[in-house]
Amino acid sequence: MLTHPPLKILIVDDEPLARLRLRGLVEANDEPRAEVIAEASSGEQALNWLRDHGCDLVLLDVQMPGLDGLGLAQLLRGRPFAPSIVFVTAHAQHALEAFELEALDYLTKPVRRERLQASLARAALRQEERAAAKARDQQAQPAGDEGPVINITERGRLLRVPLSEVLYFKAELKYLTLRTATHSHVMDGSLSDLEQRLGERFLRVHRNALVAKSAVRELERHVPTDGSAEGDGDLGGEMGWAVRIAHVNEWLAVSRRQVAAVREALAGQR
């Protein structure tokens, strides 16, 4: 029987008793196996620890003095090999913002053992998917100079799409759309995982879009037509930012926090 290493967990909470209770729940969980490898009492302390260490999952309190949980999650979001995040809080009003940051789960205090077990199971599944995706990518290098590819299962067939042909990935409800100059493909996965795997060639322009830097042709003020800018710092229906994508002449919304990064990417192409 194939066994997997235990999930490595970082607990971040400014309340010592809350950390102690979470540690006890984690250690009492039989399946999947998990171990608490570190604790932090603030967002800043957690960020400093993560600069030199890695983990699979962060159990993260939302409301803390200084750098809070949402702020820490935002900073970790763009990092290569960022850990999964499960928010743990006494307040439910931040749930929507947490999931916009692509949190794996959102637990309310007092945490029930069954809910934590379900979150750990999801984290273990994500780790398996990441490991499998990494293995596929390592095996996907074909003979010749085609370069890395994205494997897609579509209508019962396996497609190999050269990464050099991909213009963007866009989150659409429960699936992703991969767009090339000639086709749109539907695939499973998450933008966060793709962002970590694909590195510097792609740029996260919005919570729902990951764009090839080479495909960005211009950045300008744009009126959202599909509401995609709502809830991400832009005003739905009013002037926001958007990028035009080469070959397909499509416009994708850009969140305000990403405008500077898009400008930098455009400048680097000159």
Image (cartoon, grey):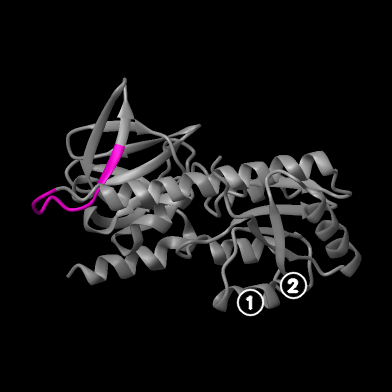
Q: Main secondary structure of the magenta part?
A: loop
Horizontal relation, residue 82 to residue 223: left or right? right
Q: Which mark is residue 40?
A: 2
Q: Is residue 162 above or below residue 12?
A: above
Closer to us: 116 or 89: 116
Q: Is residue 77 above or below residue 169?
A: below
* Residue situated furthest top in the rendering: 155
Q: Quadrant of residue 160?
A: top left
Horizontal relation, residue 142 to residue 63: left or right? left
Q: Which residue is mark 1?
A: 49
Horizontal relation, residue 79 to residue 28: left or right? left
C-alpha separation, residue under disc 1 versus residue under disc 2: 8 Å
Q: Quadrant of residue 156?
A: top left
Q: Position of residue 14 (x, y in %)?
A: 82, 70
Q: Amino acid at mark 1?
A: Trp
* Residue situated furthest front in the rendering: 1
Q: Amino acid at mark 2?
A: Ala
Q: Which residues are magenta?
A: 143-151
Horizontal relation, residue 168 to residue 269: left or right? right
Q: Are marks 1 and 2 in contact (CB under 8 Å)?
A: yes
Residue 239 showing in the rendered view: no
Whether residue 146 is in magenta: the answer is yes
Residue 219 showing in the rendered view: yes
Q: Position of residue 11 (x, y in %)?
A: 74, 64
- Of labels 1 and 2, earlier in sequence is 2
Q: Residue at x 21, y 51 (%)?
A: 141
